[in-house]
Image (cartoon, rainbow, N blue to C red):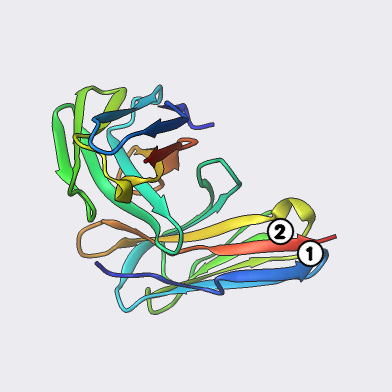
Amino acid sequence: DAGITQSPRHKVTETGTPVTLRCHQTENHRYMYWYRQDPGHGLRLIHYSYGVKDTDKGEVSDGYSVSRSKTEDFLLTLESATSSQTSVYFCAISRGKEKLFFGSGTQLSVL
Amino acid sequence: GQQLNQSPQSMFIQEGEDVSMNCTSSSIFNTWLWYKQDPGEGPVLLIALYKAGELTSNGRLTAQFGITRKDSFLNISASIPSDVGIYFCAGQLINNNDMRFGAGTRLTVKP
């Protein structure tokens, strides 16, 4: 366990509702990431953070926003959830930009 | 984005057999990582490679960083039932340090 906690672990929501996923780390790592995992696609980067209030987009950022107000917390928000955002979401952390360590994931279903 | 081609997609082997899988790309990487994912959990780092030609072992697992910097290989010797899971490669691009993931190899080990 790399000191990463994701919450919730499972969520079912309806199309059009806002959803926020939380990632909490106890490692004081600089970098934090949000990935989504879908069959046949591996892990795809949504957004990442390189410090408090410093974030950048990944390859599949449309429809998602993030915030990092404290070193230990990285929030992923779906402003208006769509069925295409049904996925498993993983948070990851790293000291540098190599050697990512992953949380246990959040299974999100948008109905 | 730059894709990693991981093969095979799945493997069904008998306990005790050796396993080989690989990742290839047209892009050049400065780091290769291999992860294992169990059902309902996040990927766990198995091996990290940092130099072209590097060969690194972790118990029954051995991974190599290809000489061309465009590929990597993972071997598992004398497989056991707990080796079951999905194995992912990840490469850190040399031009921008972004991490890319393969789609995974699903390993099934029959006792």
Q: Chain of mark 1?
A: B
SS class of the residue under badge 2?
A: loop
Nearest the eye: B69 or A16: A16
Disc ID at residue A4: none
Density class for disc 1 (Cα within 10 Å; few <14, some 14-19, many ≥20) is: some
Please say if A2 is above or below B1: above
Density class for disc 2 (Cα within 10 Å; few <14, some 14-19, many ≥20) is: few
Q: Whole-percent x and y of residue A32?
A: 30, 36
Q: Whole-percent x and y of residue B69?
A: 37, 73
Which quadrant of the figure contains the C terminus of chain B?
bottom right
Q: Would you say B58 lies left or right of A98 here?
A: right
What residue do we see at 28% from left, 37% from top? A31
Q: Which residue is mark 1?
A: B78
First of labels 1, 2 by sequence position: 2
Say if residue A90 shows up in the picture.
no
Q: Which residue is mark 2?
A: B60
Label 2 is placed on what type of residue?
Answer: Arg
Q: Whole-percent x and y of residue A5?
A: 44, 26
Point out the frontmost of discs 1 and 2.
1
In the rendered image, which quarter is residue A18 located in? top left
In the rendered image, which quarter is residue B107 located in? bottom right
Label 1 is placed on what type of residue?
Answer: Ala
What residue do we see at 49% from left, 67% from top? B54
Q: Whole-percent x and y of residue B74?
A: 58, 67
